[in-house]
Amino acid sequence: MELDETLGQVWTPDDIANEMVREAFVLSPNAKKILDPACGPATFSKAINQLNFKEIELICYDVDPRMYNFTSHVNQKLELRGETRNQDYLLDSSLESNFDLVIMNPPYIRHERIQREIKENYHQYLSTKLGASIDKKSNLFALFLLKGILDLAPNGILCAIVFDAVQNSAYGKKTLSILNKYAELISTKTVIAPFKNVLIDAQILLYRKREKQISSVIEHNVSKSNLFIPLEELLKSRRGTALPKRAPFLANIGDKYYSYSSPFFIKQSRLDGLVIKPDQRIYLNNSESERVADYQEWMKERLEKYNISENKKNVNPIKGGIAFNYYIRNAPRHLWNKDNIALSDNFYVSDPKNDFPAEVAWLLLNSDQYLNRFIASARNQGNGLLKLQLYEYKNVLLPNWNLLSPVEIAELSHLSKSLIQSGAQPKKVQEIATNVVKKLMDLQ
Ligand SMILES: C[S@@+](CC[C@H](N)C(=O)[O-])C[C@H]1O[C@@H](n2cnc3c(N)ncnc32)[C@H](O)[C@@H]1O
Protein backbone atom coordinates (compact mmCIF):
# COMPACT_ATOMS: atom_id res chain seq x y z
CA MET A 1 0.00 0.00 0.00
CA GLU A 2 1.28 3.45 -0.86
CA LEU A 3 2.36 5.54 2.09
CA ASP A 4 0.50 8.78 2.74
CA GLU A 5 3.16 11.05 4.18
CA THR A 6 0.65 13.74 5.08
CA LEU A 7 -0.72 11.25 7.60
CA GLY A 8 2.71 10.47 9.04
CA GLN A 9 2.71 6.91 7.77
CA VAL A 10 5.74 4.71 8.46
CA TRP A 11 5.35 1.08 9.41
CA THR A 12 7.01 -0.65 12.35
CA PRO A 13 9.09 -3.66 11.18
CA ASP A 14 7.51 -6.92 12.34
CA ASP A 15 10.41 -7.98 14.55
CA ILE A 16 10.31 -4.69 16.45
CA ALA A 17 6.51 -4.82 16.75
CA ASN A 18 6.79 -8.37 18.13
CA GLU A 19 9.40 -7.29 20.64
CA MET A 20 7.35 -4.30 21.78
CA VAL A 21 4.24 -6.40 22.27
CA ARG A 22 6.20 -9.03 24.17
CA GLU A 23 7.75 -6.46 26.50
CA ALA A 24 4.39 -4.82 27.08
CA PHE A 25 2.78 -8.15 28.02
CA VAL A 26 5.66 -9.01 30.36
CA LEU A 27 4.74 -5.86 32.29
CA SER A 28 1.00 -6.39 31.96
CA PRO A 29 0.39 -10.12 31.58
CA ASN A 30 -3.33 -9.84 32.33
CA ALA A 31 -4.05 -7.02 29.91
CA LYS A 32 -7.54 -7.40 28.47
CA LYS A 33 -8.46 -4.07 26.89
CA ILE A 34 -5.87 -2.96 24.39
CA LEU A 35 -5.72 0.19 22.29
CA ASP A 36 -3.80 0.83 19.08
CA PRO A 37 -4.66 4.46 18.32
CA ALA A 38 -2.79 4.65 14.97
CA CYS A 39 -3.04 1.15 13.60
CA GLY A 40 -1.90 1.49 9.95
CA PRO A 41 -1.82 -1.95 8.29
CA ALA A 42 -2.61 -3.97 11.45
CA THR A 43 1.07 -4.18 12.43
CA PHE A 44 0.46 -4.58 16.16
CA SER A 45 -2.65 -6.76 15.64
CA LYS A 46 -0.44 -9.33 13.96
CA ALA A 47 2.19 -9.07 16.70
CA ILE A 48 -0.42 -9.43 19.44
CA ASN A 49 -1.92 -12.41 17.68
CA GLN A 50 1.44 -14.19 17.78
CA LEU A 51 1.37 -14.25 21.56
CA ASN A 52 -1.84 -16.25 21.52
CA PHE A 53 -3.51 -14.37 24.32
CA LYS A 54 -7.18 -15.20 24.55
CA GLU A 55 -9.95 -12.97 25.81
CA ILE A 56 -8.44 -9.70 24.78
CA GLU A 57 -10.32 -6.84 23.21
CA LEU A 58 -8.44 -4.70 20.71
CA ILE A 59 -9.66 -1.24 19.74
CA CYS A 60 -7.93 0.31 16.72
CA TYR A 61 -8.09 3.76 15.15
CA ASP A 62 -6.93 5.14 11.82
CA VAL A 63 -8.07 8.18 9.87
CA ASP A 64 -7.02 6.60 6.58
CA PRO A 65 -9.99 4.56 5.23
CA ARG A 66 -7.59 2.14 3.55
CA MET A 67 -5.93 1.33 6.90
CA TYR A 68 -9.31 1.09 8.59
CA ASN A 69 -10.51 -1.44 5.99
CA PHE A 70 -7.31 -3.41 6.05
CA THR A 71 -7.09 -3.64 9.85
CA SER A 72 -10.81 -4.47 10.25
CA HIS A 73 -10.29 -7.29 7.81
CA VAL A 74 -7.08 -8.62 9.43
CA ASN A 75 -8.49 -8.43 12.96
CA GLN A 76 -11.57 -10.35 11.86
CA LYS A 77 -9.47 -12.99 10.17
CA LEU A 78 -7.30 -13.35 13.26
CA GLU A 79 -10.47 -13.55 15.36
CA LEU A 80 -9.33 -10.67 17.56
CA ARG A 81 -12.31 -9.30 19.44
CA GLY A 82 -12.85 -5.55 19.49
CA GLU A 83 -13.47 -2.82 16.99
CA THR A 84 -11.63 -0.81 14.37
CA ARG A 85 -12.70 2.81 13.96
CA ASN A 86 -12.16 5.14 11.03
CA GLN A 87 -11.85 8.17 13.26
CA ASP A 88 -9.43 10.79 14.47
CA TYR A 89 -8.18 9.23 17.71
CA LEU A 90 -7.26 12.56 19.25
CA LEU A 91 -10.84 13.80 18.98
CA ASP A 92 -12.44 10.82 20.71
CA SER A 93 -13.00 11.95 24.28
CA SER A 94 -14.86 8.83 25.37
CA LEU A 95 -11.83 6.67 26.16
CA GLU A 96 -10.40 8.10 29.37
CA SER A 97 -8.96 5.55 31.86
CA ASN A 98 -10.26 2.69 29.74
CA PHE A 99 -7.33 0.54 28.68
CA ASP A 100 -4.88 -1.89 30.28
CA LEU A 101 -2.42 -1.51 27.45
CA VAL A 102 -1.84 1.14 24.80
CA ILE A 103 0.57 0.20 22.06
CA MET A 104 1.47 2.65 19.33
CA ASN A 105 3.61 3.96 16.57
CA PRO A 106 1.99 7.40 16.40
CA PRO A 107 1.98 9.56 13.26
CA TYR A 108 4.92 11.95 12.99
CA ILE A 109 3.44 15.21 11.70
CA ARG A 110 5.01 18.60 12.31
CA HIS A 111 2.81 21.15 14.06
CA GLU A 112 2.74 23.52 11.04
CA ARG A 113 1.11 20.78 9.02
CA ILE A 114 -1.77 20.21 11.37
CA GLN A 115 -4.87 22.17 10.46
CA ARG A 116 -5.18 25.12 12.85
CA GLU A 117 -8.72 24.54 14.10
CA ILE A 118 -8.22 20.85 14.64
CA LYS A 119 -4.98 21.53 16.45
CA GLU A 120 -6.79 23.96 18.77
CA ASN A 121 -9.28 21.21 19.60
CA TYR A 122 -6.54 18.71 20.38
CA HIS A 123 -4.72 21.14 22.64
CA GLN A 124 -7.79 22.33 24.44
CA TYR A 125 -8.91 18.82 25.31
CA LEU A 126 -5.49 17.59 26.42
CA SER A 127 -4.44 20.66 28.38
CA THR A 128 -7.74 20.67 30.28
CA LYS A 129 -7.58 16.98 31.08
CA LEU A 130 -3.90 16.96 32.00
CA GLY A 131 -3.89 20.30 33.78
CA ALA A 132 -0.73 21.31 31.95
CA SER A 133 0.05 23.62 29.11
CA ILE A 134 1.20 21.73 26.07
CA ASP A 135 3.82 23.20 23.77
CA LYS A 136 2.07 24.62 20.69
CA LYS A 137 5.00 23.42 18.58
CA SER A 138 4.42 19.79 19.50
CA ASN A 139 4.59 17.25 16.75
CA LEU A 140 1.40 15.17 16.46
CA PHE A 141 3.13 12.12 17.95
CA ALA A 142 3.62 13.98 21.25
CA LEU A 143 -0.14 14.54 21.51
CA PHE A 144 -0.69 10.83 20.89
CA LEU A 145 1.62 9.98 23.80
CA LEU A 146 -0.23 12.32 26.13
CA LYS A 147 -3.66 11.06 25.14
CA GLY A 148 -2.43 7.48 25.32
CA ILE A 149 -1.56 7.98 29.00
CA LEU A 150 -4.90 9.66 29.64
CA ASP A 151 -6.77 6.70 28.16
CA LEU A 152 -4.92 4.14 30.28
CA ALA A 153 -6.41 2.72 33.45
CA PRO A 154 -4.24 3.16 36.59
CA ASN A 155 -1.20 0.85 36.42
CA GLY A 156 -1.82 0.34 32.70
CA ILE A 157 1.16 0.12 30.34
CA LEU A 158 1.99 2.39 27.43
CA CYS A 159 4.43 1.03 24.87
CA ALA A 160 5.32 3.43 22.07
CA ILE A 161 7.90 3.69 19.34
CA VAL A 162 8.56 7.33 18.54
CA PHE A 163 11.11 9.35 16.61
CA ASP A 164 13.98 10.35 18.85
CA ALA A 165 12.91 14.00 18.53
CA VAL A 166 11.13 13.15 21.74
CA GLN A 167 14.43 13.51 23.59
CA ASN A 168 16.16 16.07 21.43
CA SER A 169 13.52 18.76 21.01
CA ALA A 170 12.12 21.33 23.42
CA TYR A 171 8.51 20.20 22.88
CA GLY A 172 9.61 16.56 23.30
CA LYS A 173 11.24 17.26 26.66
CA LYS A 174 8.17 19.15 27.85
CA THR A 175 5.98 16.23 26.77
CA LEU A 176 8.15 13.78 28.71
CA SER A 177 7.93 15.94 31.80
CA ILE A 178 4.11 16.01 31.63
CA LEU A 179 4.10 12.24 31.05
CA ASN A 180 6.29 11.77 34.12
CA LYS A 181 3.60 13.37 36.25
CA TYR A 182 1.08 10.75 35.22
CA ALA A 183 3.23 7.74 34.48
CA GLU A 184 6.43 6.12 35.57
CA LEU A 185 9.05 5.57 32.89
CA ILE A 186 10.06 1.93 32.96
CA SER A 187 12.54 1.83 30.11
CA THR A 188 13.65 3.55 26.96
CA LYS A 189 15.58 1.88 24.22
CA THR A 190 17.13 3.43 21.12
CA VAL A 191 16.57 1.70 17.80
CA ILE A 192 18.78 2.82 14.96
CA ALA A 193 16.82 3.88 11.83
CA PRO A 194 14.09 1.24 12.13
CA PHE A 195 11.74 2.61 9.46
CA LYS A 196 12.17 1.80 5.80
CA ASN A 197 13.56 4.74 3.79
CA VAL A 198 13.59 7.06 6.83
CA LEU A 199 16.99 7.95 8.22
CA ILE A 200 15.82 8.77 11.72
CA ASP A 201 16.45 6.84 14.91
CA ALA A 202 13.61 5.93 17.22
CA GLN A 203 12.98 5.30 20.90
CA ILE A 204 10.85 2.58 22.37
CA LEU A 205 9.25 3.96 25.52
CA LEU A 206 7.56 1.89 28.20
CA TYR A 207 5.48 3.68 30.82
CA ARG A 208 3.25 2.53 33.63
CA LYS A 209 0.42 4.89 34.54
CA ARG A 210 0.56 6.01 38.15
CA GLU A 211 -2.39 5.46 40.44
CA LYS A 212 -2.18 9.08 41.44
CA GLN A 213 -0.51 11.87 39.52
CA ILE A 214 2.57 13.07 41.36
CA SER A 215 2.49 16.59 42.71
CA SER A 216 4.28 19.39 40.99
CA VAL A 217 6.68 19.70 43.96
CA ILE A 218 7.95 16.19 43.39
CA GLU A 219 7.97 16.80 39.67
CA HIS A 220 10.23 19.78 40.24
CA ASN A 221 12.63 17.73 42.34
CA VAL A 222 12.55 14.94 39.83
CA SER A 223 13.60 17.09 36.95
CA LYS A 224 16.36 18.60 39.07
CA SER A 225 17.84 15.42 40.43
CA ASN A 226 16.73 12.67 38.03
CA LEU A 227 14.48 10.07 39.53
CA PHE A 228 15.72 7.55 36.97
CA ILE A 229 19.28 7.16 35.83
CA PRO A 230 21.14 4.55 33.77
CA LEU A 231 22.60 1.67 35.76
CA GLU A 232 26.11 2.68 34.78
CA GLU A 233 25.76 5.86 36.84
CA LEU A 234 24.93 3.76 39.89
CA LEU A 235 27.20 0.75 39.42
CA LYS A 236 30.57 -0.11 37.98
CA SER A 237 29.85 -3.30 36.03
CA ARG A 238 31.96 -5.65 33.99
CA ARG A 239 31.83 -9.19 32.68
CA GLY A 240 33.13 -11.84 35.10
CA THR A 241 36.40 -13.79 34.86
CA ALA A 242 37.08 -15.00 31.33
CA LEU A 243 39.07 -18.23 30.86
CA PRO A 244 40.57 -19.16 27.48
CA LYS A 245 39.27 -22.68 28.24
CA ARG A 246 37.76 -23.97 31.43
CA ALA A 247 39.22 -27.45 31.84
CA PRO A 248 42.92 -26.69 32.48
CA PHE A 249 42.07 -24.05 35.06
CA LEU A 250 39.59 -26.04 37.10
CA ALA A 251 41.14 -27.65 40.17
CA ASN A 252 40.46 -31.21 41.36
CA ILE A 253 41.10 -32.38 44.88
CA GLY A 254 43.79 -34.84 43.79
CA ASP A 255 45.84 -32.22 41.90
CA LYS A 256 49.43 -31.82 42.99
CA TYR A 257 49.05 -28.07 43.51
CA TYR A 258 45.46 -28.04 44.64
CA SER A 259 46.42 -25.85 47.60
CA TYR A 260 47.24 -23.03 45.17
CA SER A 261 43.72 -22.99 43.77
CA SER A 262 41.18 -20.35 44.74
CA PRO A 263 37.43 -20.52 45.25
CA PHE A 264 35.37 -19.72 42.17
CA PHE A 265 31.72 -19.44 41.24
CA ILE A 266 30.56 -20.67 37.84
CA LYS A 267 26.88 -21.53 37.90
CA GLN A 268 23.88 -20.50 39.94
CA SER A 269 23.37 -23.91 41.49
CA ARG A 270 25.20 -23.37 44.79
CA LEU A 271 23.39 -20.63 46.62
CA ASP A 272 22.26 -19.89 50.10
CA GLY A 273 19.13 -17.90 49.28
CA LEU A 274 20.66 -15.23 47.06
CA VAL A 275 24.11 -15.56 48.60
CA ILE A 276 26.92 -17.06 46.54
CA LYS A 277 28.85 -20.09 47.78
CA PRO A 278 31.88 -21.26 45.80
CA ASP A 279 31.00 -24.13 43.46
CA GLN A 280 34.49 -24.83 42.08
CA ARG A 281 38.13 -24.12 42.70
CA ILE A 282 40.32 -22.66 40.02
CA TYR A 283 43.96 -21.84 39.36
CA LEU A 284 44.30 -18.08 39.24
CA ASN A 285 47.34 -15.96 39.30
CA ASN A 286 48.37 -14.80 42.72
CA SER A 287 51.53 -13.49 44.29
CA GLU A 288 52.18 -16.74 46.17
CA SER A 289 51.97 -19.12 43.20
CA GLU A 290 53.90 -16.76 40.96
CA ARG A 291 57.01 -17.38 43.04
CA VAL A 292 56.83 -21.18 42.83
CA ALA A 293 58.69 -22.34 39.72
CA ASP A 294 57.44 -25.98 39.92
CA TYR A 295 53.86 -24.87 40.02
CA GLN A 296 54.41 -22.58 37.03
CA GLU A 297 55.92 -25.45 35.07
CA TRP A 298 53.06 -27.77 36.06
CA MET A 299 50.50 -25.20 34.93
CA LYS A 300 52.33 -24.66 31.66
CA GLU A 301 52.09 -28.37 30.88
CA ARG A 302 48.37 -28.42 31.68
CA LEU A 303 47.80 -25.55 29.29
CA GLU A 304 49.87 -27.13 26.53
CA LYS A 305 47.59 -30.16 26.61
CA TYR A 306 44.79 -27.82 25.58
CA ASN A 307 46.89 -25.89 23.05
CA ILE A 308 46.84 -22.78 25.17
CA SER A 309 49.94 -20.67 24.99
CA GLU A 310 51.79 -19.86 28.19
CA ASN A 311 51.06 -16.15 28.02
CA LYS A 312 47.37 -16.93 28.49
CA LYS A 313 47.96 -18.52 31.87
CA ASN A 314 47.62 -15.24 33.73
CA VAL A 315 43.95 -15.17 34.30
CA ASN A 316 42.74 -11.96 35.81
CA PRO A 317 40.19 -12.77 38.51
CA ILE A 318 37.12 -10.52 38.45
CA LYS A 319 35.52 -10.00 41.83
CA GLY A 320 32.74 -7.74 42.99
CA GLY A 321 29.89 -7.52 45.46
CA ILE A 322 26.93 -8.16 43.17
CA ALA A 323 26.50 -10.71 40.37
CA PHE A 324 23.85 -10.89 37.68
CA ASN A 325 23.33 -13.82 35.33
CA TYR A 326 22.55 -12.21 31.96
CA TYR A 327 20.64 -15.21 30.66
CA ILE A 328 17.24 -14.93 32.26
CA ARG A 329 15.21 -18.10 32.34
CA ASN A 330 12.53 -17.62 34.97
CA ALA A 331 13.24 -14.59 37.01
CA PRO A 332 16.27 -12.30 37.01
CA ARG A 333 18.05 -11.86 40.32
CA HIS A 334 21.07 -10.21 41.78
CA LEU A 335 23.36 -12.42 43.85
CA TRP A 336 25.44 -11.38 46.82
CA ASN A 337 29.12 -12.30 46.71
CA LYS A 338 29.62 -12.68 50.44
CA ASP A 339 33.24 -13.88 50.43
CA ASN A 340 34.31 -11.68 47.53
CA ILE A 341 35.45 -14.63 45.43
CA ALA A 342 36.21 -14.57 41.71
CA LEU A 343 33.11 -14.99 39.53
CA SER A 344 32.85 -16.57 36.10
CA ASP A 345 31.89 -14.75 32.92
CA ASN A 346 28.38 -16.18 33.18
CA PHE A 347 27.79 -13.05 35.24
CA TYR A 348 28.03 -9.29 35.10
CA VAL A 349 29.89 -8.29 38.23
CA SER A 350 29.16 -4.95 39.88
CA ASP A 351 30.08 -2.65 42.71
CA PRO A 352 28.21 0.55 43.59
CA LYS A 353 29.65 3.93 42.73
CA ASN A 354 29.98 6.86 45.15
CA ASP A 355 30.50 4.66 48.23
CA PHE A 356 26.86 3.59 48.23
CA PRO A 357 26.64 0.46 50.46
CA ALA A 358 26.78 -2.64 48.26
CA GLU A 359 24.32 -4.62 50.38
CA VAL A 360 21.69 -1.90 49.98
CA ALA A 361 22.25 -1.82 46.22
CA TRP A 362 21.84 -5.61 46.19
CA LEU A 363 18.51 -5.38 48.03
CA LEU A 364 17.07 -2.61 45.83
CA LEU A 365 18.20 -4.41 42.65
CA ASN A 366 16.10 -7.40 43.72
CA SER A 367 12.84 -5.42 43.93
CA ASP A 368 10.16 -5.78 41.26
CA GLN A 369 10.52 -2.11 40.40
CA TYR A 370 14.19 -2.65 39.47
CA LEU A 371 13.94 -6.20 38.07
CA ASN A 372 11.05 -5.36 35.72
CA ARG A 373 13.24 -2.80 34.07
CA PHE A 374 15.88 -5.45 33.32
CA ILE A 375 13.25 -7.78 31.87
CA ALA A 376 11.85 -4.99 29.71
CA SER A 377 15.29 -4.31 28.22
CA ALA A 378 16.24 -7.96 27.61
CA ARG A 379 15.96 -9.70 24.26
CA ASN A 380 14.06 -12.83 23.54
CA GLN A 381 16.23 -15.84 22.70
CA GLY A 382 13.30 -18.22 22.13
CA ASN A 383 11.90 -20.88 24.45
CA GLY A 384 11.31 -18.42 27.25
CA LEU A 385 14.98 -17.45 27.48
CA LEU A 386 15.95 -13.77 27.63
CA LYS A 387 19.38 -12.21 27.33
CA LEU A 388 20.77 -8.82 28.31
CA GLN A 389 23.96 -7.64 26.64
CA LEU A 390 26.40 -5.78 28.89
CA TYR A 391 25.73 -2.43 27.22
CA GLU A 392 21.98 -3.01 27.55
CA TYR A 393 22.44 -3.86 31.22
CA LYS A 394 24.42 -0.66 31.73
CA ASN A 395 21.75 1.41 29.99
CA VAL A 396 18.74 0.16 31.94
CA LEU A 397 17.10 3.16 33.58
CA LEU A 398 16.78 2.57 37.31
CA PRO A 399 15.25 4.47 40.21
CA ASN A 400 18.01 6.69 41.52
CA TRP A 401 19.05 5.38 44.93
CA ASN A 402 21.22 8.44 45.52
CA LEU A 403 17.99 10.26 46.38
CA LEU A 404 17.55 8.20 49.56
CA SER A 405 18.38 9.97 52.82
CA PRO A 406 21.35 8.82 54.96
CA VAL A 407 18.92 7.56 57.62
CA GLU A 408 16.98 5.50 55.08
CA ILE A 409 20.22 4.07 53.71
CA ALA A 410 21.41 3.12 57.19
CA GLU A 411 18.14 1.33 57.91
CA LEU A 412 18.26 -0.49 54.60
CA SER A 413 21.84 -1.55 55.28
CA HIS A 414 20.75 -3.16 58.52
CA LEU A 415 17.85 -4.93 56.82
CA SER A 416 19.98 -6.16 53.89
CA LYS A 417 22.66 -7.53 56.19
CA SER A 418 20.14 -9.52 58.18
CA LEU A 419 18.63 -10.96 54.97
CA ILE A 420 22.09 -11.94 53.77
CA GLN A 421 23.06 -13.49 57.06
CA SER A 422 19.91 -15.57 57.31
CA GLY A 423 20.23 -16.74 53.67
CA ALA A 424 16.68 -15.49 53.04
CA GLN A 425 14.91 -17.12 50.10
CA PRO A 426 14.82 -15.15 46.82
CA LYS A 427 11.05 -14.71 46.99
CA LYS A 428 11.23 -13.23 50.46
CA VAL A 429 14.06 -10.86 49.50
CA GLN A 430 12.12 -9.75 46.44
CA GLU A 431 8.96 -9.14 48.42
CA ILE A 432 10.72 -7.13 51.09
CA ALA A 433 12.71 -5.16 48.50
CA THR A 434 9.56 -4.38 46.52
CA ASN A 435 7.81 -3.02 49.60
CA VAL A 436 10.84 -0.95 50.53
CA VAL A 437 11.04 0.66 47.09
CA LYS A 438 7.30 1.30 47.12
CA LYS A 439 7.47 2.99 50.49
CA LEU A 440 10.70 4.96 50.17
CA MET A 441 10.67 5.82 46.50
CA ASP A 442 6.91 5.93 45.95
CA LEU A 443 7.17 3.51 43.03
CA GLN A 444 4.76 0.69 42.25
C1 LIG B 1 3.34 5.77 11.98
S1 LIG B 1 1.92 4.98 11.32
C2 LIG B 1 1.96 3.50 12.27
C3 LIG B 1 1.15 2.39 11.71
C4 LIG B 1 1.26 1.05 12.41
N1 LIG B 1 0.78 1.12 13.79
C5 LIG B 1 2.69 0.57 12.44
O1 LIG B 1 3.33 0.77 13.45
O2 LIG B 1 3.17 0.00 11.45
C6 LIG B 1 0.64 5.98 12.01
C7 LIG B 1 -0.77 5.73 11.49
O3 LIG B 1 -1.64 6.69 12.13
C8 LIG B 1 -2.62 7.13 11.22
N2 LIG B 1 -3.09 8.46 11.68
C9 LIG B 1 -2.60 9.68 11.38
N3 LIG B 1 -3.29 10.64 12.04
C10 LIG B 1 -4.21 9.99 12.80
C11 LIG B 1 -5.21 10.43 13.73
N4 LIG B 1 -5.38 11.73 14.02
N5 LIG B 1 -5.99 9.48 14.33
C12 LIG B 1 -5.81 8.16 14.05
N6 LIG B 1 -4.90 7.71 13.18
C13 LIG B 1 -4.11 8.61 12.57
C14 LIG B 1 -1.91 7.13 9.88
O4 LIG B 1 -2.82 6.98 8.82
C15 LIG B 1 -0.97 5.91 10.02
O5 LIG B 1 -1.54 4.76 9.46
Image: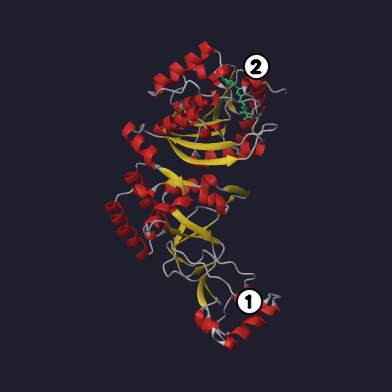
Q: Earlier in the sequence, mark 1 or mark 2?
A: 2
Q: Please rate how many residues cluster around mark 1, counting C-alpha atoms within 10 Å: few if below 14, some from 14 to 19, many from 20.
A: many
Q: What's the mark number on residue 370?
A: none
In which quadrant of the rendered image does the N terminus lie? top right
Please tell me whether residue 423 is drawn above or below residue 444 in the rendered image.
below
Quadrant position of ligand 1: top right
Q: Which residue is mark 1?
A: 248
Q: Is mark 2 within 8 Å of ligand 1?
A: no
> Furthest residue to the left?
407
Q: Is residue 336 left or right of residue 403?
A: right
Please tell me whether residue 279 is drawn above or below residue 252 in the rendered image.
above
Q: Nearer the viewer, residue 82 or 198?
A: 198
Q: Which residue is mark 2?
A: 65
Identity of the residue drawn at 32% across and 46% down: 440
User: What amino acid is labelled 1 in the image?
Assistant: Pro
- Residue 366 appears anywhere in the view: no
Secondary structure at badge 1 equals helix
